[in-house]
Image (cartoon, coloured by chain):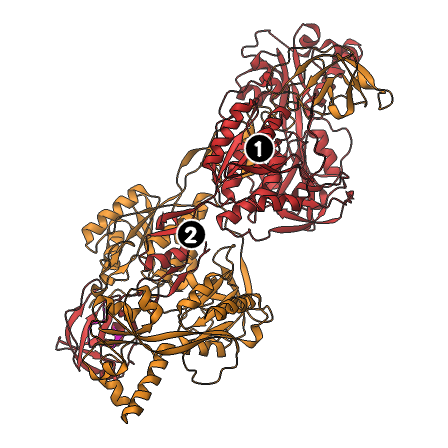
Chain colours: A red, B orange
Amino acid sequence: MERKEFRDLASPDEAREAIDSLSLEGGIDRVSLEAARGRVLVARLDAELDVPGFDRASLDGYALRARDTFGADEADPARLEVVGEVHAGEEPSIELEDGQAAEISTGAVMPSGADAMVPVERTDTDAGGDAVLIRTSVAPGDNVMFAGADVAAGERALGPGTQITPRDIGLLSALGVDEVPVRAKPRVGIVSTGDELVRPGGDLESERGEIYDVNSYTIAAGVEDAGGEAVLYPHAGDEQDEMEAVLRTAADECDLVLSSGSTSASAVDVIYRVIEEQGDLLLHGVSVKPGKPMLVGRLNDSAYVGLPGYPVSAMMVFRTFVAPAIRAAAGLPEPKAATVSGTLARQERYDEGRLRLMPVGLVQNGDGETLVYPVDKGSGATTSLAEADGVVTVDPGTDYLEAGEAVTVQLFSPDVRPPTLLGVGEDDPTLNRLLDGLENPRYLSVGTRPGLRRLREEVPDVAVAAGPLDREVDADELGRWSREWGLIVQAGNPHELEDLSDLVDRDLRFVNRTTDSGLRSSLEVAVDDLAADRDAGTGEIREAIEGFDLGLRAHESPARKVIAGDADVGLGLRQTAERLDLGFVSIGEQPVRVLANPDRTAKPGVRELATALEDVAGDS
Amino acid sequence: MERKEFRDLASPDEAREAIDSLSLEGGIDRVSLEAARGRVLVARLDAELDVPGFDRASLDGYALRARDTFGADEADPARLEVVGEVHAGEEPSIELEDGQAAEISTGAVMPSGADAMVPVERTDTDAGGDAVLIRTSVAPGDNVMFAGADVAAGERALGPGTQITPRDIGLLSALGVDEVPVRAKPRVGIVSTGDELVRPGGDLESERGEIYDVNSYTIAAGVEDAGGEAVLYPHAGDEQDEMEAVLRTAADECDLVLSSGSTSASAVDVIYRVIEEQGDLLLHGVSVKPGKPMLVGRLNDSAYVGLPGYPVSAMMVFRTFVAPAIRAAAGLPEPKAATVSGTLARQERYDEGRLRLMPVGLVQNGDGETLVYPVDKGSGATTSLAEADGVVTVDPGTDYLEAGEAVTVQLFSPDVRPPTLLGVGEDDPTLNRLLDGLENPRYLSVGTRPGLRRLREEVPDVAVAAGPLDREVDADELGRWSREWGLIVQAGNPHELEDLSDLVDRDLRFVNRTTDSGLRSSLEVAVDDLAADRDAGTGEIREAIEGFDLGLRAHESPARKVIAGDADVGLGLRQTAERLDLGFVSIGEQPVRVLANPDRTAKPGVRELATALEDVAGDS
């Protein structure tokens, strides 16, 4: 097995410089006013006309000569002859002489000879009918907006680099501009690689090791968040010719090509060879974790960055190194720093000497302080970031961070809202419905045991525990409900199971849950009882059940094995069997308890959950 | 003239309640994963499969049974027989026995019988070739990601109401989801009214009082900012039948109809009648400034809000009352409060007893404190908001705010970046080019005199003054250049003007600039000199020039009058004449000075301008 080693890793700064040295800029787009919001003006825009284009009445009333009103007041109005009227949108046909006035609407053109207007509220029609009594005096220019007073022809209206807001669209409309030259969004081609990848929506053959392509869609969304235009290319296999063809097409059509998707060494090697032989390789490997296996280079006239294969790594590298370059090319400013200060919830060791980008979640403790906990499901995890709020950057020189240490979290975006409630523990359908009604909860279904352990470590607000509790927990029980558990079998129960004994005595393939789950705990108690009934050893009974030691993490996975025909019987809930139209043999009921950290019971999110639990208790 | 009065104005809270009582919600859209970013999930999404779907090797290396490695280390490796290999994306064809290992790639399916793997870095190929030396011991599960470890089937993946981020798209991709149910964007129809309105891009007849339609496009952009979908309807005239037809069509097709655009009393009256007679009028008039003439009601099954006609009023009412309702209907949270504290730059009087929404601009003084100045070009102004950064809300009970009073500014959006430099004064082409090179300047071309007055009031950082200075200003001159001014005539100078005397002695129609402009000041000096030469009175000379008293605000407007044939001669710059391909008769040169507030010379934006001025000085 021949392998490429990253012997000379570039520093993060060198990686940034390498990417900055690539030109990602697109050209100029001309977009309509309707499509201009958020785009970046490419050149200064000067007013080509006066706004308003004429001297304009600001109110409904009478246009007149100011000097005819001098001295007029409520008691002693000036009497002027009304010689006509002017409406908005029509050309005045009159010319005012001394002692004359014209009725005028808001927004109408001031007639010649008039130099001011008086609002209708300060006038009375004269009994005679063809005259008006003016009960105030005005100065020349009063209640008139002169041509160009709003914007004057030749004036600088918007500068280059302006990111167009709705308010700017108002200015552009006033100037009659219906098309503006804006920076083209940088086109970013995304080439997904790896023979094992299947596009979402396609059929997955898990037994062949196929997985859905996570990187392409995630990175595409990140590209658009950063102001670029994402172009997804058809999946390229691991053959060099095919890969090269796809990369070249993408390089011809885009300003930047990102390859992404594969963790396979052979696919990475093929891309590496294409860039090194056909393009210009600037950098290979960066001293950052996650993200070491990063490539930076050029292919044809396009920039190229190879992202690591693992989704979390790919996204972290994208955010740190690539997104800023896309924003710069799009003419967008860096988003305002959105940071949160908090204290680390538990010790973190790290001594690899690379810059570390540590995805973290946030939770407020009972004192309203922010606790910061690392979110890490292992290097192959695809979904950790959906459970994270931001990133803590750890210096290469830092070997460990103590629990309680102050850290600064860079939020993923300024509008990230950390959850109002952090729960951990058993997965349960009733709980899921409950969570749906809460404002912004986060729930990590790690199982009952790990949930209780984390509650003792005082990170989450609540833990949800099903089945018997191993030991006392210092917690406030917010509420509980009961659920029926047992054996899930195919619809109609074709093997005619009656109870747990059948599993011991007959030749059936069983699928269990992991020891983390509360269901497993209840099953073990039932097996102990059966052993006691039979005067047998527990180990003996367990061994008689084929698959007892094969524990799956997911609460629906045993049922799904039954559906797939890979097992005859699975451990599960009546609710799951009913939802999936399967048969069910009941063994017992178990309580599901919601246990809160006693310091957090006054926290709004916890109180909201407690209130929701009152209704559930009422249901059951 | 019959007029509707707003006798019983609703309070702002009543207006909010009336709008909340309307239902703006759209239905459900099913969108592809590529289009899901930023949309709001309408229902909970549970995992329908395990991720990964199989036990997966986390690294390149060897799959094996952990117990075969117990006790192995660098010095004393375990020797295992290599019985095959498994690549990513293929189904393993082998089953491991004791003492056996299989070569395995990152991401590949663990073969049956294997319960752990060892990375290739901790192994050596044996000389023999069909065996591997394992130089470490591993526990069961080491370097293996078990099926469902990332996401487990049946697990709650995303809750209802989630606004989908790129990270959530990662989770959805991993689950193979290629389409998600999201809240439909509320459809908001915008009906523009008023016979005087012309869509941007169309031809404007200013002499008829036509103006471009500002509200439709501005409000449409505001609707989209708030998460709605804007639909612009064709312009409706002021006839009741036509208006009613457009309003009904919009009400049928949209969740909310906004009418907007006209300041004309007749158009407003027509709409009022349609809603009152054909629909359900909830509210007419709100005690807020700007924004009094607001309507809230229903038409058919749609909600209806009538916005005031003036663009600034329309936008302020939209932001304050309508945008929050659109966001709520779209399922979007209110944007995080983005406020800035500052002190008011000058006294503001206000005693109308209505809630006041005061658009303001921001500028930092020399001490880094934020000064807040009202932005108001008068009630007909369309463009004030483009020069504002946010809004100060003034209580109905507050009659005036003192200069220096602390105020809180609600920024228009969290990403508003107040300008780095605030300049005021003369409009000038050289200055405009200079400004283009600065980071984020704001320049208000109010003319030389008002600019100097504002500089004395210590609001702007710099003032730009052209021509002779009336009196001493306490300011630091950052730089200056010279510009040639004179008489702009038609191309080829058909009237064969030679100098200012021709304007006095011949029968030519002249267009002047206002007394605010530095050009006018220089012209007045030249007229004084001519009067002295002729031993005549200045007034006499001025009166001999037809149009001397007609001063236009905009520096290009006189030239444009010449182009339009409305004048024979206009006051202007050589640069303007050349740009517009007109003739030019030079009268003189005048200095343009950039004068800085002495307290602000260390401010980065001022320093940036000073540096840019060095190059200009070099040019001229």
Q: Position of residue B338 (x, y in %)?
A: 53, 57
User: Are the residues tagged 1 and 2 within 8 Å (C-beta)?
Assistant: no
Dots 1 and 2 on the same chain:
no
Residue B302: in sight, yes or no? yes
Q: Residue at x 41, y 39 (%)?
A: B184
Q: Along the line of sight, which residue is nearer the eye, A53 or B36?
A: A53
Q: Quadrant of the N terminus of chain B?
A: bottom left
Kind of residue indicated by mark 1:
Ile
Q: Left or right of B360: which side holds A275?
A: right
In the picture shown, does residue A33 fall above or below B595? above
Q: Position of residue B393 (x, y in %)?
A: 47, 64
Q: Is residue A117 magenta?
A: yes
Q: Main secondary structure of the magenta part?
A: loop
Segment colored magenta: A109-119
The image quarter in which residue A482 lies: top right
Q: Left or right of A437: which side holds B500?
A: left
Circle 2 residues within 10 Å: few <14, some 14–19, many ≥20: many
Circle 1 residues within 10 Å: few <14, some 14–19, many ≥20: many
The image quarter in which residue A277 lies: top right
Kind of residue indicated by mark 2:
Ala
Picture disc at residue B323: 2
**Distance from the alpha carbon under mark 1 to that under mark 2:** 49 Å
Q: Along the line of sight, which residue is nearer the eye, B187 or B105?
A: B105
Of helix, strand and loop, which one carries label 1?
Answer: helix
In the rendered image, which residue does mark 1 sit on? A275
Write down the chain letter for disc 2. Answer: B
Q: Left or right of B293: which side holds B342?
A: right
Q: Left or right of B601: which side holds B196?
A: left
In the picture shown, does residue B140 fall above or below B461? above
Q: Along the line of sight, which residue is nearer the eye, B534 or A620?
A: B534
